Amino acid sequence: MCSGWARCRDRVYRLLEELAARAPGLQVRPVRLPVTERLAAVRSGELDAALVRARPDAPGLELLPLWRDRLYAALPGGHPLARATELDPEQPAHLPLRLAARETNPPFHDLVAPLAGAPAGPPFTDLLATLTSIGENPQNPSWTVFYEVGPLPKLPRTAIRPLTRPALTTYLAVQPGPPGPALRQLLAAAAARAPEAANP
């Protein structure tokens, strides 16, 4: 019924638990697909709904906000900014920003790239390798932005600080128009689990 991904599995599990409590007879079939295929499956009716991060280009679909997650900045542990408890995105803007290529995750790239007008740094590869590299190169300081993929990594030479903005919104992509019975139950479960973010 709904497509998700590993990062938000805990929230998805809680959402599915709420849905099962509300509609015990409803059969749910979670699937994992790339975002473009996910949205195409909703458009075609193969999926009732899909979870998507940031705000992807989704012509012909309605995007309903479900919840928001903080973004985090990683920078060398010895940098003066590492003493802060949280950072405005403008604060590390003088440092090269490590960011994955746009085609890897266009919505997230478009959210992060204009944050501070930072110069481009070495490419973001995977999270652990990038965070390790940031901590091991204090003579050439750089930073990156990421969202939680589980417990925050703890690296002795890398500081991880929450950003004051922006937040990363997770949306439920659905076809426009009145929702069917199954989707109504899903929206009610989402509202119960995240009433501050969901507004179906």
Image: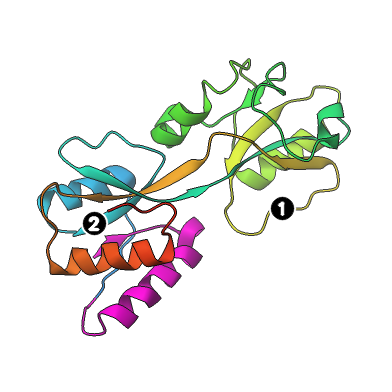
Left or right, 10 with reference to 84? left
Q: Amino acid at mark 2?
A: Ala
Q: Residue at x 71, y 53 (%)?
A: 153
Q: Which mark is residue 49?
A: 2
Whether 23 is among the magenta residues is yes
Q: Position of residue 132 (x, y in %)?
A: 75, 42
- Whichever of labels 1 and 2 marks the residue nearer the N terminus, that label is 2
Give the main secondary structure, helix, strand or loop, of the magenta stretch.
Answer: helix
Coloring applied to the structure: rainbow
Q: Determine whether 154 is above or below 36 in the image.
A: below
Q: In which quarter of the view is residue 143 placed?
A: top right
Q: In which quarter of the view is residue 25 placed?
A: bottom left
Q: Amino acid at mark 1?
A: Pro
* Crowdedness near tag 1: few (<14), some (14–19) or many (≥20) residues, C-alpha within 10 Å: some
Asked whether residue 81 is in view, the answer is: yes
Secondary element type, mark 2: strand
Q: Residue at x 30, y 63 (%)?
A: 31
Residue at the bottom extreme of this rendering: 24
Q: Position of residue 39 (x, y in %)?
A: 24, 46
Residue nearest the observer in this picture, 103 or 109: 109
Quadrant occupied by the N terminus: bottom left
Q: In which quarter of the view is residue 164 placed?
A: top right
Q: Which mark is residue 84?
A: none
Q: What residue range appears in magenta?
A: 1-27
Left or right, 164 with reference to 199? right
Residue highlighted by disc 1: 153
Q: Residue at x 33, y 36 (%)?
A: 56
Asked whether residue 122 is in view, the answer is: no
Q: Residue at x 43, y 71 (%)?
A: 13
Q: Determine whether 198 is above or below 144 in the image.
A: below
